[in-house]
Image (tube, grey):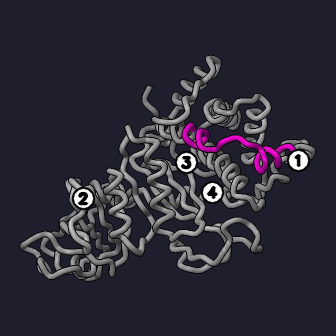
């Protein structure tokens, strides 16, 4: 990975091994643990993450403040404001110094996010990077990036900030590792830039990107990913237009057509794709899916992969429930559908742990302060996801390879 080189102190090496060796049952589900064992496991995770996360901070007092803030986010009840974080640490006088650390200190959050991404990747073994919008309601008008926005996941407008997070995601767990706040650009541009800026740091490890936001201009988005050489799976609406590239298909050589119309004529290409489903008697649910080779309306795209339109049906007589376009044309439909399922994992983990970690809780007005807070809140989210098994809600824990 490009970026900062994180050197873990020798006294932390054993804790890294201990974190990986936390007992799990078959399938990655944590073994039931006593309260004391759960607290011990959680402390190991916090110590190990802190050693990696704050190694880039040059001063000891900065590393101490960083760990205090992380622990405060994990311990606070209710809104994770700086005041509440300081109060839960048992010393309300810490509020001023923590405020300075988050809002005014000059430390760079970028190497910290790189360290977080590397640490989370080792812990959960991600299959893809999932990009998802986070809506942050605000009552005032003075915080950076505040305006009127639309939340596609709740299908409603709101007043506040819009941020796009890049989530390290496997089928068992997910956690955000970097963020981009919407400032003077479209949602398509913000989501794409968040993914590509992050992908440049991981150029030796080309996991695909799953863009879980209904883009308005899929052609522009696909072209940016093609130019960067990054594999991507993009959620689209039924009216997005493409050209059919399969000579045997209706619509071939007829110009750009709506994606929903193209897939409606692809009934003969539908094949059952098996997906894991614990509610199914066999543990596998088969859904109709189809792939159609397509092109961009604006002409030839500079890609060696080609493009395919992917549709998934809940009912054979209804329009496709999910529509995607991808430059991973050679991947089987079952593999692509498995990647799309990661969006559900991210949605579940955001709902279950996002507010508990304080992702939406920065009360300051500055862009620097927002970035510093959400970086540490993302670290708190990772801890919550990895250690929640004995804390009331069963969660998964990836058994990392040695």
Q: Tags 2 and 4 in contact by the CB under 8 Å rule?
A: no
Q: Tag 2: Cα neighbours inside 10 Å, few (<14), some, or many (≥20)?
A: few
Q: Tags 1 and 2 in contact by the CB under 8 Å rule?
A: no
Left or right for 377, reference 401: right
Q: Nearer the viewer's eye, disc 1 or disc 4?
A: 1
Whole-angstrom CA distance, mark 3 to mark 1, is: 27 Å
Q: Secondary structure at mark 4?
A: helix
The numbered mark, 1 or 4, whose residue comes first in the sequence reads 1
Mark number, residue 48: none
Whole-angstrom CA distance, mark 1 to mark 4, is: 25 Å
The residue labelled by disc 4 is 354
The residue labelled by disc 2 is 302
The numbered mark, 1 or 2, whose residue comes first in the sequence reads 1
Q: Which residues are magenta?
A: 96-115
Left or right for 121, reference 382: left
Whole-angstrom CA distance, mark 1 to mark 2, is: 53 Å
As for residue 221 lying within the magenta part, the answer is no
Give x and y (percent) for residue 186. 51, 71
Regarding residue 199, the answer to whether it shows in the image is yes
> Residue most toward the top?
10
Q: Nearer the viewer's eye, disc 1 or disc 2?
A: 2
Q: Tag 4: Cα neighbours inside 10 Å, few (<14), some, or many (≥20)?
A: many
Mark number, residue 96: 1
Mark number, residue 177: 3
Q: Is residue 385 above or below residue 361?
A: above
């Amino acid at each position: 990975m490009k970026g900062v080189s994180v050197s873990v102190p020798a006294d932390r090496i054993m804790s890294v091994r201990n974190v990986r060796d936390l007992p799990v049952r078959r399938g990655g589900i944590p073994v039931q643990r006593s309260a004391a064992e759960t607290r011990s496991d959680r402390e190991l995770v916090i110590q190990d993450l802190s050693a990696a996360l704050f190694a880039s901070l040059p001063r000891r007092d900065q590393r101490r403040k960083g760990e205090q803030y992380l622990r405060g986010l994990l311990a606070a009840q209710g809104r994770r404001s700086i005041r509440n974080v300081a109060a839960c640490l048992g010393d309300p006088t810490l509020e001023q110094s923590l405020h300075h650390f988050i809002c005014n200190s000059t430390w760079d959050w970028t190497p910290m996010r790189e360290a977080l991404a590397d640490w989370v990747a080792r812990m959960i073994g991600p299959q893809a990077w999932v990009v998802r919008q986070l809506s942050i309601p605000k009552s005032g008008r003075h915080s950076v990036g505040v305006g009127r926005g639309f939340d596609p996941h709740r299908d409603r407008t709101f007043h506040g900030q819009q941020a796009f997070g890049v989530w390290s995601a496997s089928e068992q767990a997910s956690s955000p590792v970097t963020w981009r706040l919407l400032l003077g650009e479209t949602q398509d541009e913000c989501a794409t830039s968040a993914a590509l800026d992050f992908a440049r740091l991981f150029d030796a490890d080309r996991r695909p990107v799953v863009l879980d936001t209904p883009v308005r201009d899929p052609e522009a988005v696909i072209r940016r990913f093609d130019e960067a050489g990054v594999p991507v799976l993009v959620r689209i609406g039924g009216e997005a237009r493409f050209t059919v590239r399969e000579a045997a298909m209706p619509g071939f050589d007829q110009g750009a057509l709506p994606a929903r119309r193209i897939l409606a004529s692809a009934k003969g290409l539908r094949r059952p794709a098996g997906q894991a489903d614990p509610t199914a008697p066999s543990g596998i649910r088969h859904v109709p899916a189809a792939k159609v080779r397509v092109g961009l309306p604006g002409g030839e795209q500079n890609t060696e992969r080609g493009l395919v339109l992917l549709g998934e049906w809940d009912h054979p007589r209804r329009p496709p429930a999910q529509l995607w376009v991808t430059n991973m044309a050679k991947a089987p439909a079952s593999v692509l559908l498995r990647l799309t399922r990661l969006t559900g994992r991210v949605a579940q983990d955001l709902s279950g742990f996002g507010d508990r970690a304080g992702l939406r809780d920065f009360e300051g007005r500055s862009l620097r302060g927002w970035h510093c807070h959400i970086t540490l809140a993302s670290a708190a989210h990772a801890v919550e996801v990895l250690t929640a098994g004995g804390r009331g809600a069963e969660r998964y824990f990836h058994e990392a390879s040695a």
